[in-house]
């Protein structure tokens, strides 16, 4: 193969992988949350966009790179906090982005936004069964997974979203109401949690890494370059789409009530912009966007538990069980799934961000103690946030946490994580020095 052909192949490969990564990230939450944040932000939507970009794009794509740098598996990523804690964390994350929350939400969103507006109130159970049968059809052939998503499904999603966003910007559906920049940023930041993409990145990154290897790239330096380029393509696509959807939501801030359901808001916006054809185009877009995420997550969960059990659990059995359980969960509807997800995400998301950042700088960290110190510091705050969102507020603890640096902006866990990291690093260095002294004597 000539040098020119090699260059062309690399370009084509990272474009396909980048489009597939975009499609797998862009699922149910990514479609319904930006407009709902925009409608609450009004003319301060730029600040909510910044917040959403941090947790909805920046952290997830850093997560893909962190997975690559840590060894390419969930195990190597999470075991920095210890073998047992790492396995516990991995199982919680995988179950959250799997059959407990994320996967059922893709089916519920498809039903509420893609089926009901077009076909009426068909049985949600029947729709879920058909939806997950299609998911399994893709997932049971994982070798062609990335190419199928990147070449077939992604262009359809991008085309429909481009039409919706372009026309919505050209002819806004309403004026923007007054909004607070601080509140808007916080809404965007925590709204990014709801996409679950930082958690998804930890497992979707494994699919991307395996796809790069399957395409014949064995050198680790080249692999990371391919993953970085693919991530930049995915990030660019997500930024355009998120920014557009947030703006569309903001233009509806004086048209619809702020408490309108997330799915109904997107349906109304699409109908207002595209007329009667809006619900049909939106239905197709939702079905494909949610399906790509469902396919990616289900496949990764199959791999995860297959490897966790030392291959005692068959990949095929795990993905079928995931599909069956998700079918039952999806019948509850989007709003119920979101309600369940908030406390768990408030607890696990900061821990994931800390692990992502530390894994990126793993070659500069001595031992496991610094990881554990940072995670303990973050967990103290994130667990309190979990209790608050579940309605179990502990007064004195909440008062202390609310006074932490950047607590109002959603970063209350940051300072305790840094302090925990510094203290644990000092202890680690002292232990290391003592060992060296004993060896020398």
Image (cartoon, grey):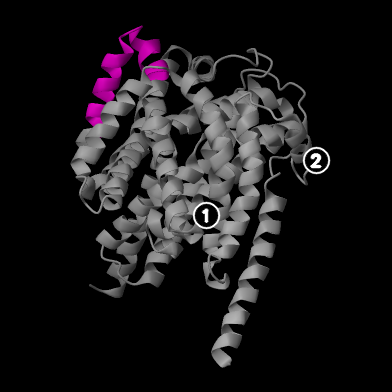
Is there CB contact under 8 Å for labels 2 and 1? Answer: no
Q: Which residue is mark 2?
A: 403
Q: Is residue 137 above or below residue 217?
A: above
Depth check, front residue: 169 or 59: 59
Q: Residue at x 29, y 15 (%)?
A: 125
- The quarter in which the N terminus is drawn is bottom left
Depth check, front residue: 93 or 232: 93
Residue 243 shows up from this direction: no
Question: Which of the 4 image quadrants contains residue 350?
Answer: top right
Residue 307 shows up from this direction: yes
Q: Is residue 206 above or below residue 255?
A: below
Magenta-span inclusion, residue 123: yes
The numbered disc on residue 62 is 1
SS of the residue under disc 1: helix
Tell me the magenta residue range: 111-135
Q: Residue 134: horizontal and vertical position, in percent?
A: 23, 29
Question: Which of the 4 image quadrants contains residue 57?
Answer: top right
Q: Residue 7: horizontal and vertical position, in percent?
A: 34, 67
Q: Residue at x 44, y 50 (%)?
A: 202
């Amino acid at each position: 193969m000539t040098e020119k052909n090699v260059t062309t192949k690399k370009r084509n490969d990272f474009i396909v992988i980048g489009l597939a990564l975009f499609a797998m990230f862009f699922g149910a939450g990514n479609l319904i949350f930006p407009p709902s944040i925009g409608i609450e932000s009004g003319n301060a939507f730029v600040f909510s966009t910044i917040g959403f970009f941090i947790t909805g794009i920046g952290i997830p794509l850093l997560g893909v790179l962190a997975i690559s740098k840590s060894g390419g598996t969930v195990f190597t990523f999470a075991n920095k906090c210890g073998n047992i804690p790492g396995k516990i964390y991995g199982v919680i994350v995988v179950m959250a982005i799997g059959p407990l929350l994320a996967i059922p939400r893709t089916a519920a969103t498809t039903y509420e936004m893609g089926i009901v507006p077009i076909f009426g109130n068909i049985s949600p159970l029947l729709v879920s069964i058909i939806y997950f049968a299609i998911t399994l059809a893709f997932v049971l052939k994982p070798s062609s997974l990335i190419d199928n998503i990147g070449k077939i499904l992604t262009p359809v999603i991008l085309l429909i979203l481009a039409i919706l966003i372009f026309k919505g910007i050209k002819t806004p559906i309403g004026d923007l109401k007054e909004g607070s920049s601080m509140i808007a940023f916080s809404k965007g930041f925590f709204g990014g949690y709801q996409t679950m993409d930082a958690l998804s990145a930890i497992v979707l990154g494994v699919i991307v890494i395996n796809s790069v290897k399957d395409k014949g790239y064995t050198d680790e330096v080249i692999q990371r370059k391919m993953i970085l380029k693919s991530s930049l393509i995915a990030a660019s696509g997500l930024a355009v789409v998120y920014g557009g959807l947030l703006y569309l939501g903001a233009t509806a801030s004086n048209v619809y009530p702020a408490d309108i359901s997330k799915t109904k808001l997107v349906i109304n916006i699409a109908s207002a912009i595209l007329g009667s054809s809006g619900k049909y185009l939106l239905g197709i877009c939702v079905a494909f966007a949610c399906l790509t995420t469902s396919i990616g997550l289900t496949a990764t969960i199959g791999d995860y538990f297959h490897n966790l059990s030392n291959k005692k659990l068959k990949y095929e059995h795990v993905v079928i069980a995931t599909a069956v359980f998700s079918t039952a969960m999806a019948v509850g509807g989007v709003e119920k799934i979101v309600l369940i997800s908030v406390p768990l995400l408030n607890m696990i998301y900061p821990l994931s961000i800390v692990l992502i950042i530390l894994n990126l700088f793993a070659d500069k960290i001595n031992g496991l103690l610094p990881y554990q110190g940072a995670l303990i510091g973050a967990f103290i705050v994130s667990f309190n946030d979990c209790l608050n969102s579940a309605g179990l507020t502990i007064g004195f603890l909440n008062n202390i946490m609310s006074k932490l640096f950047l607590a109002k902006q959603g970063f209350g866990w940051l300072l305790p994580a840094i302090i925990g990291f510094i203290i644990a690093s000092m202890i680690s260095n002292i232990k290391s020095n003592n060992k060296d002294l004993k060896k020398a004597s």
